[in-house]
Image (spheres, coloured by chain):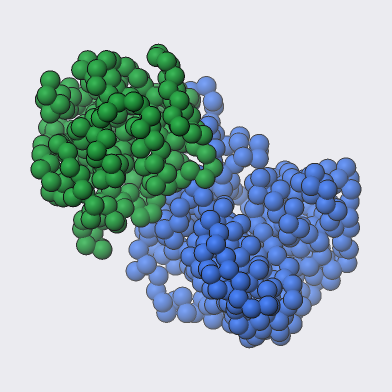
Amino acid sequence: MDAWWMCEVPYPHVPKDVLDAADSVRASLPNRWCDPRVAAGLFDEVIDEYLLCDEMGLNIGATEHHAGINSLLGANPMLVSILARQTRKARILSLGTLISLRREPVRVAEEYATADVISRGRLELGFVKSGGTEMASANANPVNNIERYWEAIDLIGKALTHQDGAFSWEGKHFTHRHVNIWPRPWQERFRMWAATGDPHTAAEVGRRGMVHTLVLRGHEGTRRAYAAYRTARAEAGLAPVSTDNFAYSAFVSVGDTDEEGVRVGEKLLWFLNTSLKSAPQYAQLLPGTAPPHIAGQAWRTRPKPQSGGPNLVNAEKGVATAQENALKLMSTTVEQAMAQGIMFAGNPDSVYAQIKKFHDDVGGFGHLTIIGRTGFMTHAESEKNIRLLGTEVLPRLKAIAPMTPTLEQAA
Amino acid sequence: MTETLAPPADRIRVRDVDLEVVRQGTGRTLLFLHGFHPLAPDARFLELLSRRATILAPSHPGFGTSSRPADFETLYDLVHLYRELIDGLGDDKITLVGASFGGWLAAEIAAACSHRLDRLVLIDALGLKLGDRETPDILDIFNTHPDTVRRRSWHDPDHEAPDFDAMSDDALTRHARDWDALSLYGWEPYMYNPRLKRWLGRIALPTLVLWGAADGVVTPDYGRRYAGFIPGARFALVDRAGHHPERERPDALADHILDFLGH
């Protein structure tokens, strides 16, 4: 198993009373609350942490989110390019530019090609669907977001691999009549990743043979999404893939002791408890995010009398919106997070054991993408986490070899 | 290629689109194009108009239970769909009435084929960009808090705004389906066609522009300017109505329209 360290570069330094008063901490929170001097310090620390990962043998990944306290990485390829120059060995995963928000996929391909050349072929391409507040902040129509997602992937993929002069693209969402990017990327082929929890998208990820990444989905959601991937491949007559095609993303906090790992790990829950707050128009009332028979229920101001709670049961039926998933996560405690397999925390032995158990429970995965720093976790805590991960946990994870279970075994 | 089913059928097929439709009354045909949501079959506004005309009130593709083919997703598609529907009706000319989003559609259709229409009525119509580039004309109903949208949509929100808690599951499902379709057609540019203003001068038929006096989605001033682009158009306010006078003041609105139609 490979391990990839990631930091979304959150900005937790907004006064709590401001966050409490805001109906959304994304999209609409005025950026006067973001002090660029503080932000510069955060970027310094986080880039140094990435360099430490490189030294410790960890791979690295960078996400993208827009216009909120959860992440200052609105421009993923810029950080990826810096990492491409400053690191030496690590593979660099862009997970990823939010391509359904970008008007020019060919420009994204140019950015990736540049980073790939600078890194001499260490770039991996991940694609994330986006949604929620980012539809407002990017002026992106939420209803056909998924169509733009796949079309942009196709166009970027072709632009990065086509070497025979200009080609034309006249798609449904993107037109570009003369595509011929320079520099040509270092790699002839890119490994592509996709992060999604919904089974429909997972099936397409499977047919394409991309690395399927589940972010904080726990045992059931992860197992179900991996199954959708494998089933779709089998139904399409495609060969089974190894666990190397699967990835899982969770909070990881390693301390010298269990107590330290859990205490520091609790700080990571800021991501769930504070940074997900979204106003209803950016979340459950956003068009196109759930089938109408589910989305309609979100208009109720209180649950149906006989239903006994919010409509979250759908999250377990594989039709949950990301927002429904987020609602479940917002009130999570550290004990719950660990029980659900969205956090691995403790001393190195405990963390390894938790990861291995989760790995075995969900049928295996070849990549752990680590949400290693968020919220008020300090630079020192983050560096200690990285060092312990690199020296104590990574060697044992590396020993978990890929396997190719049959459909029945995987189920 | 319109296939009209015999009354009291509540579906009309136009090519590959299956539309649910409210059809009632007798006499000249009046096509009503709805706004953010279709009117209910028993809506008082439709009933009042049906006393003097044959009302045809389809739900746009993707709204209510009307089908929407996968590649049918622009105003261009809607305009051509309704032009074909009008051509298939067999009437020499019909009266076209559109409210809000449907008012935008009606203006587009009238600019394209006013020879098939005898009268045009626009009610709190969307469709134009009038303010400067940093001043939106139309309240962004998708990116604005629902409480604000509610407050600005109705003269008297507490009495007129929909009570979602009282709705059936089916009604909520319809509501969500409408919402998706509206977003698909109107997300960007948000609820307007930058080219439409130039061509409103082509509308060569008697036109009445009606506006809820308390409309906070698009203001009456926007409505007055809208009317100003249509040669000879009359403008009138509907008192004690917001963006949806066909729901909030159906009697007053119908009176205006029936007067205009010469009844």
Looking at the image, residue B29 sits to the left or right of residue A144; the answer is: left
Q: Quadrant of residue B189?
A: bottom left
- Chain B's shade in the image? green
Q: Relative to A151, is B153 on the left or the right?
A: left
Whether A207 is drawn above or below A187: the answer is above
Q: Position of residue A123 (x, y in %)?
A: 69, 75
Residue located at (29% from left, 56% from top): B195
Residue drawn 71% across and 48% down? Answer: A203
- When asked about the image quadrant of residue B227, the answer is top left
User: Is there any visible trace of residue A68 in the rendered image?
Assistant: yes
Figure colour of chain A = blue
Say if A393 sits above or below A223 in the image. below
Above or below, A83 relative to A276:
below
Q: Position of residue B76 (x, y in %)?
A: 39, 47
Q: Nearer the viewer, residue B165 or B142?
A: B142
Please state the horizontal and vertical placement of residue B220, each as a whole percent of the image. Answer: 15, 44
> Does residue A351 appear to the left or right of A37 in the view shown?
right
Residue B224 x %, y % = 13, 46
